[in-house]
Amino acid sequence: MATMTQTPARREPHGFFTDTTVCIGCKACEVACKQWNQLASETGGQQPLSGDSYDNTQRLDGMNWRHVKFIEQFSADPQRTQQSRWLMMSDVCKHCVRAGCIEVCPTGAIIRTEFDTVVIQADTCNGCRACISACPFGVIDINENAKVAQKCTLCYDRTTIGEQPACSKACPTASIQYGPLNGPNGLKAKAQERVQQLKEQGVDQAQLYGADDKIVGGLNSFYLLVDRPQVYGLPENPQLPSRNLGPSSALTTVGAAVMGLLGLVSLRKKRMDHFAGQPADRER
């Protein structure tokens, strides 16, 4: 993506609502993402078997901007098979309202677009990897072909011309929905209606993850879950690098004060030793 020379006109925040209850694990989103963004396979087209259910991608990284997770929950009791289930979730960059990657990027390569989404400009990234450790969701990684940090752009090149992202376009069950987040017809309102519908059907654990501002100010790519976030590999209370600014500043101040005090003590001791040695010199 070319470097943006000026800030685009602000638009209504857009993002993804992922309803995990209707994901069928077809991986159409993964394929569409790779095809549109021309993301090569790590092994020249032959994806190795991971041995982890049907999940061969394993995680989000610089080559895989979409990752379909498979969580198998089977009862050990053969008489209770009705309690067994598959949980599937198409994972992606969360496009955080408070983005840790933006906080630490030293070159300004990571920007917030007019859609309130987060994009890494490849031609400005120096590959320092600061953003990788700053992301609490483990989204960003180095693309070994481009040698820079990369992740989902929420198909910025498509959304700017009125098209929806490739992954949501390809999703056959509308598990991935794209559009404005707020308002009576926004994704958050639709998500709340879906949660209420599931609860009425007896799915008491139905909940939204990232739809409010409790998680890093809110996620522009949020999820409907039917189990604890940790089950899906999502942190319950993700933290940003800025959380350490206060404690680290205090420690730096205390450290500087201690070093200064030690310097004064050392200087005073040298002066006392010097004066203590003067009479002995005169006696000689």
Image (spheres, rainbow, N blue to C red):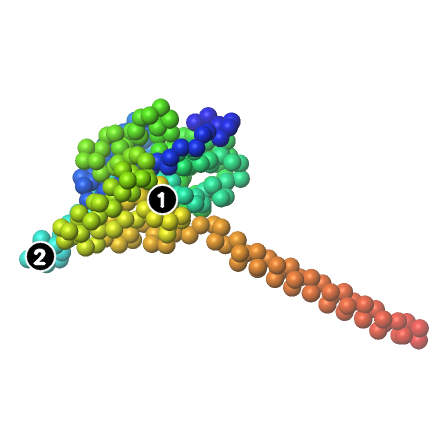
Q: Which residue is drawn at 73% across and 67% down?
A: 265
Q: Position of residue 128 (x, y in %)?
A: 50, 39
The amino acid at mark 1 is Leu
Q: Which of marks 1 and 2 is nearer the N terminus?
A: 2
Q: Position of residue 261 (x, y in %)?
A: 69, 65
Whether 3 is drawn above or below 270: the answer is above
The amino acid at mark 2 is Arg
Q: Residue at x 93, y 73 (%)?
A: 282
- Characterize the local packing of mark 2: few (<14), some (14-19) or many (20 or more) Cα atoms within 10 angstroms: few
Q: Where is residue 9 in the image (x, y as percent from the top left)?
A: 45, 30
The residue wearing badge 1 is: 219
Number of numbered discs on residues: 2
Can residue 226 be seen here? no
Q: How far apart are marks 1 and 2 (CA)?
A: 37 Å
Point out the frontmost of discs 1 and 2: 1
* Whether label 1 touches label 2, CB < 8 Å: no
Left or right: where does residue 249 sit relative to residue 180?
Answer: right
Name the quadrant containing residue 118: top left
In this view, which residue lies farthest toward the front?
184
Left or right: where does residue 171 sit relative to residue 276?
Answer: left
SS for dot 1 = loop
The residue wearing badge 2 is: 80
Q: Where is residue 41 in the image (x, y as percent from the top left)?
A: 32, 31
Q: Which residue is drawn at 29% across and 53% down?
A: 230
